[in-house]
Amino acid sequence: MRTALLVGVLAFDLGASPASAQDYQDGQLWSQTVATSQLSARWRSHLEFQPRVFDNVRELGITIIRTAIGSQMTPGVTVWAGHAAVARSLGPRTTWENRAWQQLSITLPRAGTWNPSARIRLEQRRLGAWSNTSHRLRLMARAQRPVRANGPWHLAVYDEVMFSLDTTPRGPFRGYDRNRAFGGMGRRLSTAFTLEGGYLWENSTVRGPGQRNDHVALVALNVAWPRR
């Protein structure tokens, strides 16, 4: 009986292997430095540098340089508009993707000890191999809470889902693009510097049948310069 059960399980595994062969996994390391500055009572600036190492942390795959100007509409709402230059260096040569983007950042009311926030971003993406501009919608919900009241450490979680709004020939398909879920810890180093790190799981579609499931170690340095 046990032998028959084992044979059945192995047969099921072998029968399922062609489908699972279309799923892809990778271990990656992402680091990012985000500097925001308060230019005036209303205006803000954003500068971001984000290299990502792919192929089980063996090769630089993507480097993102993002800039933006923001306007604080209310104490909890800021609108942004900017540009991102994305160097895709995985493989024999580097190609550049350019993105214009607009964003609504919202600070939500406290929920107990948690500080929730939300982000809505639209991107217009262009890459040389694509025959047209690809439009993408990104929706993020985030929450963080201190480990101890008034202490330097905090817990952080967020989830971000992305949808392509159109089908671009030789580019992204319309519909679900990817989802990122993050959990980690951060430490306030000073009034201006905060370091955060943790694990990020990214599920994404690939061209043709299949899915990607990337496991990412993420380290982020956030710099917030106050107005002088």
Image: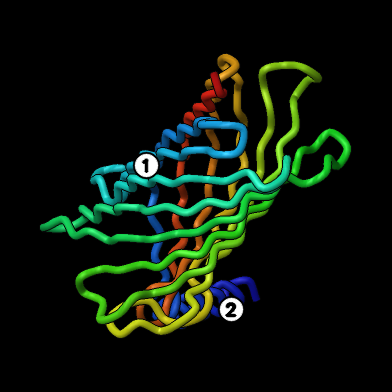
User: Could you tell me how far apart the alpha carbons at marks 2 and 1 are, in whole angstroms?
Assistant: 53 Å
Q: Amino acid at mark 2?
A: Ala
Residue 128 image position (x, y, % from top left): 20, 70
Q: Is residue 97 above or below residue 84?
A: below
Residue 16 image position (x, y, % from top left): 47, 79
User: Residue at horizontal 30%, vertical 80%?
Assistant: 132
| Along the viewing direction, whichever of 89 and 119 lies nearer the viewer | 119
Query: Toward which corner of the image does residue 173 lie, by quadrant?
Result: bottom left
Query: Toward which corner of the image does residue 120 lie, by quadrant?
Result: bottom right
| Along the viewing direction, whichever of 186 and 206 lies nearer the viewer | 186
| Along the viewing direction, whichever of 175 and 99 lies nearer the viewer | 99
Give me the disc on residue 4: 2
| Along the viewing direction, whichever of 198 and 84 lies nearer the viewer | 84
Q: Amino acid at mark 1?
A: Gln
Circle 2 residues within 10 Å: few <14, some 14–19, many ≥20: few
Q: Which residue is outermost to the right?
A: 112
Under circle 1, the secondary element is: strand
Is any atom of residue 123 visible in this view?
yes
Q: Which residue position holds label 1?
A: 50
User: Residue at horizontal 56%, vertical 72%?
Assistant: 6
Q: Is residue 148 above or below residue 159?
A: above
User: Residue at horizontal 45%, vertical 59%?
Assistant: 101
Under circle 2, the secondary element is: helix
Left or right of 221? Residue 116 is: right
